[in-house]
Amino acid sequence: MAIDSGTTLSQLSARRRLTNVVASVLVYAAFAVALIPLVWLAWTVVSRGIDRFMVDQTGATNFNLDFLQQSMRGVMGGAIAGGALHAVWGTLLITLTAALISVPIGLLTAVYLVEYGRGRLKRAVTFFVDVMTGIPSIVAGLFAYALAAVVLGPGTKTGFVGAIALSVLMIPVVVRASEEMLRLVPNELREASYALGVPKWLTVIKVVLRTAIAGLATAVTLAIARVIGETAPLLIAVGVADSMNFNIFDGRMMTLPVYIVAEWRKGEAVCNDAAIACLPQITEYRAWAAALTLILIVMALNLVARLISRLFAPKAGR
Amino acid sequence: MSKRIDVNNLNVYYGDFLAVEDVSLSIEPNSVTAFIGPSGCGKSTFLRTLNRMHEVIPGARVEGEVLMDGVNLYSPGIDPVAVRRHVGMVFQRPNPFPTMSIAENVLAGYRLNSKRTSKAEAEEIVETSLRAANLWNEVKDRLDRPGSSLSGGQQQRLCIARAIAIKPDILLMDEPCSALDPISTLAIEDLMHELKENYTIVIVTHNMQQAARVADRTAFFNIAGTGQPGKLIEMNDTRVMFSAPHEKATEDYISGRFG
């Protein structure tokens, strides 16, 4: 006996039609609600971040890129000057160094876990990666600072120490994300390669990693995005600076998140010299402009990862 | 160059579980040998021991010997990677490399092993392998298109071309037609007839008509029940197997009175 007890095929019932409408409305509504904070945030950062770019050193409204061309060296009070060039460089250099440390370690760990790991060691590695994922970023900063104090001397704050702190946070993210990507590679491709008389290590490099490369690029981008906005560990391990410093092994450096904190903390500037164009809210302007810059850098990074994915993705279709 | 295989008292294990028990058989060069039997009887597992693909699975191992022209593939000094260069394999589901073009797929055995070939050599290998796999005429104008752009049957023939491109002595085929339509199946069966001129072919199939059509000799595997090891029940000329099998179990299986 059929489930439908009627003798003819029944019409789509009003009840089912209603359920469909209600479910659709709920799904779209949930999507809209999820979008609200994102759009709101983007709008706030753009509308406030643009202020610093719209005021020039005379106080006139005039679009300029001073903010991306100057450091904070010698900038005092509410002077409409000073930018985040040193912080942009600091962020890029420290994050790049962190990526150079974390990506090889993380990727090799993921390869071990997916392709070679077995038994207790594999379980132990998985466990410690999980534990590392949960480390608060401030603890990573303190760890790197303490490590540097022992190895390089007390009170050492350099970009490299910051990069180590970020690596502690980044490695587990790289491991986790790339592990997922490597598991997505069908086992049939590994077997196809073995059956052609290809040794395992070449199979891993030329088949598994090659097939997963688009996903791995995404994994690395995610990991970088995860650490590029870190503030607390850099505040501890790298400190603050007002001038340019391209040497990650010597001296303090500024980074964008720390720059935001530093500017924000200054509060309203005092304007008492009528001779200089002055703006009490300039510190706030700088903080928002730095936030906008940071978001733009992350977006650019995402675009690059997309491009890599597109270039290397398995070709499909006719 | 085609070679013969002699298997002596082979036991195949997954960890402690004995999957196939005490198989002894001989496979003649330049012939097609079919393995038939119900699901789970260990015929695919046994096939994978012939090129040491079985041990790729963690915990899997074998006891006994497999002789290829008298050389035991399981001698301590033998490199499984080298064995697989002599014994090629085609799998149940077509598995071309998705990141490679048609031509690159054919050359995969060389490229993945970082073996250098001149451009002329490479073109020659691609053409002869694809011709041997009866695929050349269909793809010669689009060799740089991705392998995944082909139909299922074409993909499987591409995988055969890839397997024979490295000039193995023996070609193992694990249910190569089970994912294909009848026309593609026919194309591959015709291909097997041609390939046995140069290779020893061993095929696992669920399709008894297929075994009857393509195989010179047929081996029947069976299993007593779940948890029991699979066994070789009978092996003989295909004609004999399908007309006058010696064992009752074979006859029951072939005539569909099984289970």
Image: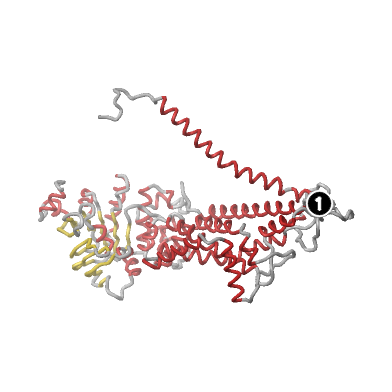
Q: Quadrant of residue B52?
A: bottom left
Measured as percent of width and height from the top left, residue B9 is found at: 18, 67
Residue A56 is left or right of residue B3, and the answer is right
Task: Please name the residue that numbered disc 1 is placed on.
Answer: A279
Residue found 33% across the figure and 66% down from its top: B84
Measured as percent of width and height from the top left, residue A137 is found at: 57, 61
Measured as percent of width and height from the top left, residue A284 is found at: 73, 52
Q: Secondary structure beneath disc 1? A: loop
Res B169 seen here? no
Q: Nearer the viewer, residue A250 or B115?
A: A250
Residue B23 is left or right of residue A215, and the answer is left
Task: Indicate whether A145 appears above or below B219.
Answer: below
Residue found 29% across the figure and 56% down from its top: B174
The quadrant of the picture occupied by the N terminus of chain A is top left
Identified by mark 1, the residue type is Leu
Residue B218 is left or right of residue A225, and the answer is left
Q: How is the image coloured?
A: secondary structure
Residue at far top of view: A7
Q: What is the chain letter for disc 1?
A: A
Task: Indicate whether A75 appears above or below B138.
Answer: below
Q: Count residues near mark 1 (Cα–Cα under 10 Å), then give few for <14, some for 14-19, many for 20+.
A: many
Q: Nearer the viewer, residue A267 or A176?
A: A267
Residue found 71% across the figure and 54% down from its top: A287
Q: Quadrant of residue A113?
A: bottom left
Residue B253 is left or right of residue A280, and the answer is left
Res A47 seen here? yes
Measured as percent of width and height from the top left, residue B80 is found at: 33, 69
